[in-house]
Image (tube, rainbow, N blue to C red):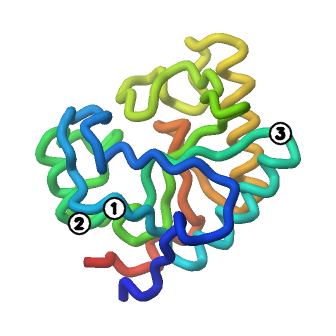
Amino acid sequence: MKQQLINIAEQKLDIIIDLRYASSNNFTKEIIYKTNECLLHFEAFEHLSIACELAKKLNYKIKIFDAFRPVYAQEKLWEILPNSEFISPPLKGSPHSRGVAVDLTLTKDNVELDMGTDFDEFSKLSYHGSKEISELAYKNRLILLGIMMSAGWDFFRNEWWHFQLFNSKNYPILY
């Protein structure tokens, strides 16, 4: 099944890859991934390509924090933070573990746009519709949301950075 995954770094996309779980720069402060390959299901990759083009037209560049997440990593995240408001229970199957979800932000001149919180801020401030962030951060979230939805992605209301294919549960969990 993993043959359905594409290594994003090997593609000709104008994109920044910063896999947070391949380093200790994440909420766990631990290296979770055994590799730093940024992988996506080929159908999700097509939508990511469209999003990159749309961002480029607006003078932005996409920066990816996470894409395919192996089941062992999902289990580790759940072990550290068993909160289904932000982390999918491993038995349910995360869209990340199906290769059809991405966590990302927008950059301009290689600087991340202000989104009101950092990636993996597990609070109500990270909700797409939070009114407790600055006007600029709210505007930036709307730009990101518009780009991603125009490219065929669905969003997760609790995390401004998380997008997945609309039919994500139709894809098998990849072990």
Pick whichever of labels 1 and 3 is earlier in the sequence: 3
Q: Which residue sits at x=71%, y=63%?
A: 152
**Mark 1 to mark 3 CA distance (whole Å):** 29 Å
Work out whether residue 95 can be spotted: no
Q: Amino acid at mark 3?
A: Asn
Pick whichever of labels 2 and 3 is earlier in the sequence: 3
Secondary structure state at the residue bearing disc 3: loop
In the image shown, does 84 or 145 lie closer to the viewer?
145
Q: Relative to 166, say whether 122 is above or below.
A: above
Q: Which residue sits at x=17%, y=57%?
A: 75
- Judging by the rendered image, the residue that carries numbered circle 3 is 59
- Judging by the rendered image, the residue that carries numbered circle 1 is 69
Residue 94 lies left or right of residue 141; in this view the side is left
Q: Are marks 2 and 1 in contact (CB under 8 Å)?
A: no
User: Looking at the rendering, in which quadrant would you find the N terminus?
Assistant: bottom left
Query: What is the residue that sits farthest to the right in this orientation?
Result: 57
Q: Amino acid at mark 2?
A: Val
User: Looking at the rendering, in which quadrant would you find the C terminus?
Assistant: bottom left
Q: Relative to 53, say whether 93 is above or below.
A: below
Q: Which residue sits at x=21%, y=61%?
A: 34
Q: Relative to 11, say whether 128 is above or below.
A: above
Q: Amino acid at mark 1?
A: Arg
Neighbourhood count class around disc 1 (C-alpha, 10 Å): few under 14, some 14–19, many 20 upward: many
Residue 173, percent across and down?
33, 76
- Judging by the rendered image, the residue that carries numbered circle 2 is 71
Secondary structure state at the residue bearing disc 1: loop
Residue 124, percent across and down?
44, 23
In the image shown, does 151 or 26 lie closer to the viewer?
26
Q: Which residue sits at x=43%, y=52%?
A: 66
How many numbered circles does the render carry?
3
**Mark 2 to mark 3 CA distance (whole Å):** 35 Å
